[in-house]
Image (spheres, helix red, strand yellow):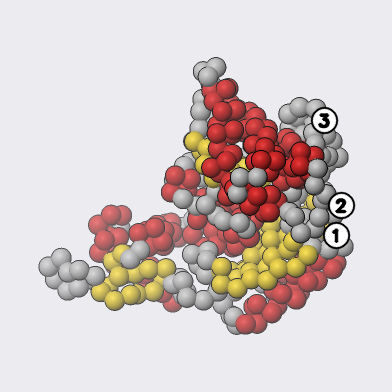
Amino acid sequence: MRRLDLRKTQAAHFNTIRDINRQIVLNYIREREPISRAEIARETELQRSTISAIVEDLKSEGLVEEIGEGESTGGRRPTLLRLRTAGAMALGVSINPTHTTVATSDLAGRVVEQEEFLTDPDSDKTLGHVIDLVREFSNRNPGAIEGVGVSLPGLVNRAIGDAVYIPYFKWRNLPVANVISTAVGLPVIVDNDANAVALAELWFGRPEVSDARDFILVMVAEGVGTGIIFDGQIYRGESGAAGEFGHMIIAEQAPVACSCGNHDCWEAFSSERSAMARYFKLSGREESPSFGFSELVDQALGGEVHAKAALIETAHYLGIGISNLVVGFSPEVVVVGGKIARAWPLVESALTETIEHSVRRGLPSAKILPSTLGEKPTLRGALSLVLAGKFSAAFAA
Ligand SMILES: [Zn+2]
């Protein structure tokens, strides 16, 4: 018999019927806007009076607004509803190994304002800079910011808000949420960057991804991380460390060291850094600060042979790791995020050929799609940490 583990059932999961109905109405408006109260009533079978009461609440909370009138179907013209997207309501902080971005967004996840600085390996300096910018943005939007989401490139304990281990800077057990929250007086949610991006795909990605119950997000940046969405939720594992597939062993003698120091991890074969190392070796060019992975993608898209070869080889190794994940999890979709998504026309066949190789043995396949979140997926992810909680109590802090 299946036994309920009550220790893991948090209070937030005990929704009242009204909370559930509220989420149904808010998500109908989110997905189907502009929509009238009558249309919601027809499609959900909720009582008209229940919907009207919920809509009034959502309006007074500033989540929903009325826009003009729709087509009449006989009687009075219905008033249409949509998400209130005017103005900032969430703050996102994306701490990456090289850059940190702080931004505000509206309820639909669109970035309103953003600022970027170089991440300092000294955590006091980076968090100090983050706190200054969060204060500045929230002072500019008095009373509007509901929370701060922080994405971090490493192991995170979301429940207590700590960075457990960030390999790039050797940050250990750093109470990131507590430090920022105490300084700025706003609720702060921290999560691993790949989990945050998976959440952004779930709520703001293309329908093929956001409608899938099970998908895996593979985040390619300085490192390689994965976020697993299982049955519409982030799969975290026992200690929140699930998804560390960047360190699965793929082959030997990678072109660069992994962030963990080894030379046999998937990350060491498939990250942006590995593609850069391949390019410099093939082209004989000197490394320079003005030539980063974005420039490599530009060169490859422009037809430069060494850049193309470096990306295609990187995609081959990326494909090996993805086919292992597909064989193990059988997800509906695998989404590839990061700047490499922009080079999709060049890398798609190298990726899919590797994956089809394992599928030919009769193993399950999955759709492999580039992310549509753009060049700063971890920022969209950080913002989603706050926004997802507005649309689903399951993601509330
Ligand atoms: Zn590793």
In the drawing, what numbered circle is on residue 121? 1
Q: Is residue 263 visible?
A: yes
User: Mark 2 sits on what residue?
Assistant: 170
The image quadrant where one finds the C terminus is: bottom right
> How dense is the environment of label 1, judged by Cα within 10 Å: few (below 14), some, or many (20 and up)?
some
Q: Going by the image, does 43 lie left or right of 248?
A: left
Query: Mark 1, mark 3: which one is toward the viewer?
Result: 3
Tell me where residue 331 appears, x and y as whole percent.
53, 34
Element type where label 1 sits in the image? loop
Q: In which quarter of the image is residue 323?
A: top right
User: 383 or 97, which lies in front?
Assistant: 97
Q: What residue is pinned by disc 3? A: 253
- Compare marks 1 and 2 and give the one earlier in the sequence: 1
Q: Do the residues labelled 1 and 2 touch (CB within 8 Å)?
A: yes
Q: Observer-nearest residue: 63 or 1?
A: 63
On screen, residue 345 above or below 1? below
Q: Earlier in the sequence, mark 2 or mark 3?
A: 2
Q: Is residue 1 left or right of residue 127?
A: left
* Number of numbered discs overlaid on the protein picture: 3
* Residue at point 53%, 23% (across, down): 359
- Report the amino acid beneath label 3: Gln
**Residue 243 in sight here:** no
